[in-house]
Image (spheres, rainbow, N blue to C red):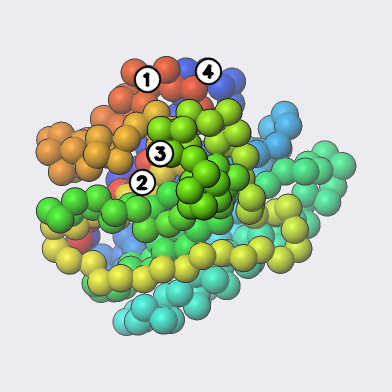
Amino acid sequence: MNAWGITDKGLVRALNQDAFFLHVLHEDGQAVLVVCDGMGGARAGEVASETAVDAFVEEVRRALKPGMDAAALKELLAAAVAHANDVVFRRASSEEYAGMGTTLVAALVSGRQVAVANVGDSRAYRIGPQGITRVTKDHSLVEDLFSKGNLTYEEARSHPSKNLITRALGTDAIVDCDLFSFAFSPGEYVLLCSDGLTNVVEDQEILYETLHGGQPAHACTQLLELACARGGPDNITVALISL
């Protein structure tokens, strides 16, 4: 099991308000990945994403045990997201950080079991010889309109309100997260990313760079460079794990 990750402010934003963490426990066949994309004025978005990552990882480290099955991993994910939300929400109650929040997408791997959680529009993908599948569904205004058939795919990608999310960590005392699980097969990858990647890079391009762009260790950097070649209008974060 191997994991790689990269984050960058892109070519337009003054600050990088994304944050990520990844760690592989080779002795237990387990791994944790999490990506957060913060929002808020001044440095508040940066604080929100870093706070969420730290709190999420704190809970995972406390409760992760060897040999956990998919149900246990999903339960742990839900608890870690709730803990991260509580910490960010309490910090956002101060005048300095009022109104801040963050997306979160995370994956826990134990053996061949994978569990994924998301809040907001940062995404998780499953990539392998069978192709690329988006595991998560964006919590966004545009995703809702697209799901209802009110927008075409191309209209959704260029919609002026595509960055308006309908769910985030830290904005309410309680947050709902979506949970998913599946069995990981050799030769497959799980990729997490912020919307700074997916707003300018197509899913099939993500598939190509991951499987056919050269060494997997370089895939995150190549995807970052591709996003920057498209203007890099937002912060960009990519985290990748292979079995």
Residue for badge 4: 12
The numbered mark, 2 or 3, whose residue comes first in the sequence reads 3
Kindly report the distance in space between the C-alpha atoms of the residues bearing marks 2 and 4.
21 Å
Q: Is 167 situated above or below 227?
A: below
Residue 76 left/right relative to 127? right
How would you rate the neighbour count of disc 4 (Cα within 10 Å): few for under 14, some for 14-19, many for 20 or more? Answer: few
Q: What residue type is labelled 4?
A: Val
Q: Nearer the viewer, mark 2 or mark 4?
A: 4
Mark 2 or 1, nearer chain start: 1
Q: Which amino acid type corresponds to the residue marked 2 in the rendered image?
A: Ala
Badge 1 is on which residue?
A: 230
Which numbered marker is on residue 92? Answer: none
Could you say whether the residue bearing mark 3 is in a helix, strand or loop? helix
Quarter in which the C terminus is drawn: bottom left
Confirm whether residue 5 shows in the render.
yes
Depth order, front residue of 150/32: 150
Which circle's residue, 2 or 4, is located before the other in the chain? Answer: 4
Q: Where is residue 75 in the image (x, y as percent from the top left)?
A: 50, 78
Q: Residue 222's image quarter? A: top left
